Image (cartoon, rainbow, N blue to C red):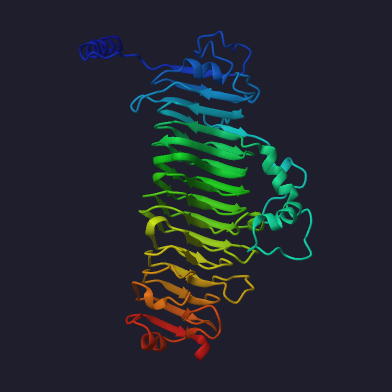
């Protein structure tokens, strides 16, 4: 069947089905001498600006953008802002891409009220932090002054705000300089795919608001305040964030919040975050954080209004969230408030979280901390050498049940190896848990279970002591080197 006959058949079928048919086109954007926005966008007569292509591209079309610097496009949406407003379909998306290795430089893209658009292969370059006075890549913390005394972090923010803002003046100045600008901003988007882009120097590398079925994959994001940031409920629904590399975020690497549902945060590498690496906040439900590597974070915990930070932060969220198969290591917090590998904080309406098969290693705080978050299922995790570099004697439990409300936890099949304070520490509520069994302990000078926060409370250094005074660990295993 020749191509002309095939096209005729497709047109007849479209007419018979009462639908329209338009053949997909391929367009080109270059900065060569023959390029002009008055052209037709063909390879012989390419357009000069990406925004010209964005206005004309329809469902099924592909726009190839050649190497060049497109950051000075003036579209009426702000200098360098390229609006992508047209929609494709699920079977015929609009694709903006580059030739392999081209990496055209762009400033910002705004996808608004559109669906099924693909953006891949661009280099978004903003106000790169390395070029700003006073900035040094983390883990060096940018301090302008060093206070003679550490603030009391249990006091209200107003009592320490002036001191903290003076100490971290460059840090706050960098955030203000970026003025909430995003490299890619998606508002009311459906079926958007953002892949294989390089992004550096923004308040948010990628920002999503009121979005569904978004895929954010294989991007490299660095030197932003937040690598990926979502907000405005429901911020993100039925979406995937996977295989991204996110480093040097002044705040959070991946920040998912405000009513997001069924978001899969899978197999990302997030490192050198100023606060948390991955956060599910404010009403997130039915989402999973799975098989991510998150290391070295929390360097700006002292600047937080409510310190401090943890590597994976599940806060004020709803039911159905799962944290599975992650490596979280080297989270710090000099405020001695958090710095945990994982924190389950203020779960709403008794919502439970499942935490399984994670490795929590050498975090300054606890491996896992629950704070007013009952009913968690904590299974088959490895808690190793937490409390690394800490000073306070209560810092560095494998699992800490921090408040009276942290009840009915299920803690099964976990390994606790050389954690600084204890394998499990609880706030006088160890007897009020749902089940603690089949865990393995190897401790050095620390109890296997410590039911209290003072030296006079019940500290169990042996399985015999645990079994004689609690209903737990009938099938547990452990060695306390303190007693050898």
Question: Visible in this render: residue 373?
Answer: yes
Is 11 left, or right, of 324 in this rendering?
A: left
Q: Quadrant of the N terminus?
A: top left
Q: Is residue 4 above or below residue 461?
A: above
Task: Report the residue at 57% width, 37% height from top.
Answer: 198
Residue at 49% across, 61% down: 343
Q: Position of residue 62 (x, y in %)?
A: 44, 22
Give coordinates of residue 263: x percent, y percent: 40, 45
**251 left or right, relative to 240:** right
In this orientation, which residue lies closer to the viewer: 228 or 9? 228
Q: Position of residue 2 (x, y in %)?
A: 27, 12
Q: How many marks?
A: 0
Residue 297 to residue 3: above or below: below
Q: Is residue 460 above or below residue 396?
A: below
Would you identify the image quadrant in which residue 77 lies?
top right
Does residue 351 appear in the picture of this structure?
A: no
């Amino acid at each position: 069947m020749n191509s002309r006959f095939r096209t005729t058949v497709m047109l007849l079928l479209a007419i018979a089905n009462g639908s329209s048919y338009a053949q997909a086109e391929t367009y080109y954007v270059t900065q060569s001498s023959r390029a002009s926005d008055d052209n037709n966008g063909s390879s012989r007569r390419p357009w000069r600006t990406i925004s010209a292509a964005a206005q004309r591209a329809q469902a099924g079309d592909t726009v190839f953008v050649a190497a060049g610097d497109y950051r000075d496009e003036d579209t009426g949406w702000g200098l360098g802002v390229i609006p992508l407003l047209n929609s494709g379909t699920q079977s015929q998306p609009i694709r903006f891409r580059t030739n392999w290795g081209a990496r055209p430089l762009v400033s910002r893209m705004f996808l608004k009220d559109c669906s099924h658009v693909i953006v891949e292969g661009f280099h978004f370059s903003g106000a790169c932090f390395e070029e700003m006075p006073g900035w040094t890549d983390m883990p060096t913390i940018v301090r302008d002054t060093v206070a003679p005394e550490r603030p009391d972090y249990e006091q209200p923010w107003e009592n320490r705000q002036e001191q903290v803002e003076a100490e971290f003046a460059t840090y706050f100045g960098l955030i203000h300089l970026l003025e909430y600008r995003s490299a890619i901003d998606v508002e009311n988007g459906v079926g958007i795919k953002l892949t294989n882009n390089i992004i550096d120097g923004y308040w948010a590398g990628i920002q999503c608001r009121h979005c569904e079925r978004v895929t954010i994959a294989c991007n490299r994001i660095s030197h932003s305040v937040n690598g990926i940031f979502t907000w405005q409920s429901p911020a993100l629904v039925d979406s995937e964030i996977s295989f991204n590399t996110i480093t040097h975020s002044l705040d959070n690497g991946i920040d998912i919040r405000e009513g997001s549902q069924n978001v899969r945060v899978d197999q990302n590498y997030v490192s050198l975050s100023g606060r948390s690496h991955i956060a599910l906040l404010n009403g997130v439900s039915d989402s999973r954080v799975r098989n991510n590597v998150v290391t070295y974070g929390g360097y700006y915990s002292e600047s937080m209004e409510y310190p401090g930070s943890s590597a994976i932060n599940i806060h004020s969220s709803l039911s159905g969230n799962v944290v599975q198969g992650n490596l979280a290591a080297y989270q710090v917090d000099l405020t001695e408030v958090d710095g945990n590998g994982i924190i389950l904080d203020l779960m709403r309406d008794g919502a439970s979280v499942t935490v399984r098969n994670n490795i929590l290693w050498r975090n300054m705080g606890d491996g896992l901390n629950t704070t007013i978050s009952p009913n968690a299922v904590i299974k088959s995790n490895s808690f190793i050498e937490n409390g690394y570099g800490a000073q306070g004697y209560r810092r560095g439990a494998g699992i800490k049940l921090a408040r009276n409300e942290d009840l009915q936890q299920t803690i099964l099949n976990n390994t606790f190896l050389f954690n600084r304070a204890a394998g499990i520490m609880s706030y006088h509520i160890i007897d009020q848990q749902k089940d603690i069994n089949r865990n393995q302990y190897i401790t050095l000078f620390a109890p296997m279970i410590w039911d209290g926060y003072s030296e006079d409370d019940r500290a169990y250094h042996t399985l015999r002591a645990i079994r004689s005074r609690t209903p737990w660990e009938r099938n547990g295993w452990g060695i306390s080197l303190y007693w050898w």
